[in-house]
Image (tube, rainbow, N blue to C red):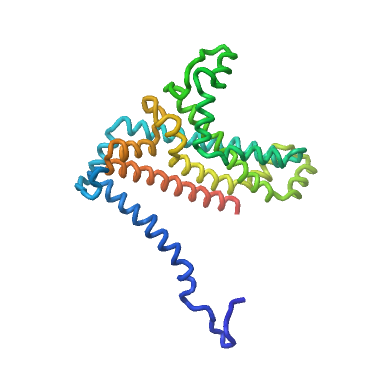
Amino acid sequence: MSAGDPQGKSLVPRWTPYAFMAPVFFYLLFLDFIPLLNELYLSFTSTSLLTPANHIWVGLDNYRELFRNADFLHSIWITAIYTIACVVFAIGIGLIAALLLDAPFRGRAVARVLVTLPWAAPPVAVALIFTWIYNAQYGVFNYVQKLMGFDAFENWLDTPNRALIAILIATIWQIFPFSSVVILAALQGVPRELRESAAIDGAGPWAIFKAVVWPTILPTVMILALFVTIWSLRRFDLIWLLTQGGPIGATNTLVIDLYRRAFVYRDLGAGASVGMIGLSIALAVTMVHYRLSRRFGAAGA
């Protein structure tokens, strides 16, 4: 029932909704839209970090130079592999962990707390842990390699064909708990009566998961996939702390490339161009996500 006087006129002023929206509007305007427009402008200029107020308009030259650069194209390829692997494995392992934690067993509360610990760890601590694990002389991975009869005494982070795998293991170890917690919350919304009815009808665990559980948690998994994708596209701290994009560009993602161009080579124009390309990829992924969500929503209606 809406608030109003006896004559039916609302006692809430017309501008009240705009007053509530104003802080959000000004936040987005000054901290998102204006900086983005400034970055877009920078991407069409030649601007040095040492003299950021001096811009030379170069049009699309920065973008042409980037797409002619084999190292930049390689960084897009590395970013794609890194992002897809993070989404698939972080959500896959998180789903398995959530299903296990959803089952009743003694000590379940303690297990749920332990699973979330990697997510709570700061990236610097995670980098230190995995630097030790991958160490050539006393790291756990090399010890296991020796036990299995493989060549050992090789630092994974210094080896071009293993560095990306090493980064992925560290990243997935840190972020899969978030996926498991989110999916576990979605599992609490699956009607228990439907599971019990399906079991009474003779359905096995896989059939119950496929027909009852998965359709219920699918919207949550899809929005989770979007979040993990965007976070993976923009992840900088852990990769920089472990390899700084090396060796020989083996872990050089778009964000690492942006940082190097803008703050190491001091070329703000080229760095802004890389940033706008990364933003375009993130927007494209978001649009695909919402189109798929609409299609699945229409199919499930």
Q: Residue at x 32, y 30 (%)?
A: 71
In the rendered view, would you say 156 is above or below 31? above
**Residue 286: x, y in percent?**
46, 48
Viewer-proximal residue, 274 or 108? Answer: 108
Q: Most extreme residue toward the right, as rendered? A: 200
Q: Position of residue 259 (x, y in %)?
A: 35, 39
Residue ID at (50%, 37%): 123
Q: Quadrant of residue 256?
A: top left
Rendering coords of residue 83 (x, y %): 47, 37
The residue depicted at 49 percent of the width and 74 percent of the height is: 16
How many discs appear?
0
Above or below — where is 38 with respect to 12? above
* Along the line of sight, the residue nearer the viewer: 19 or 135: 135
Is residue 250 found left or right of 185 in the rendered image?
left
Q: Quadrant of residue 248?
A: top left
Residue at position x 72%, y 50% in the image = 191
The N terminus sits in image quarter: bottom right
Q: In the rendered view of the protein, which quadrant contains the C terminus?
A: bottom right
Q: In the rendered image of this protein, does residue 26 appear above or below residue 113?
A: below
Q: Where in the figure is residue 82, as x and y percent of width and height?
A: 46, 34
Q: Residue furthest bottom?
A: 7
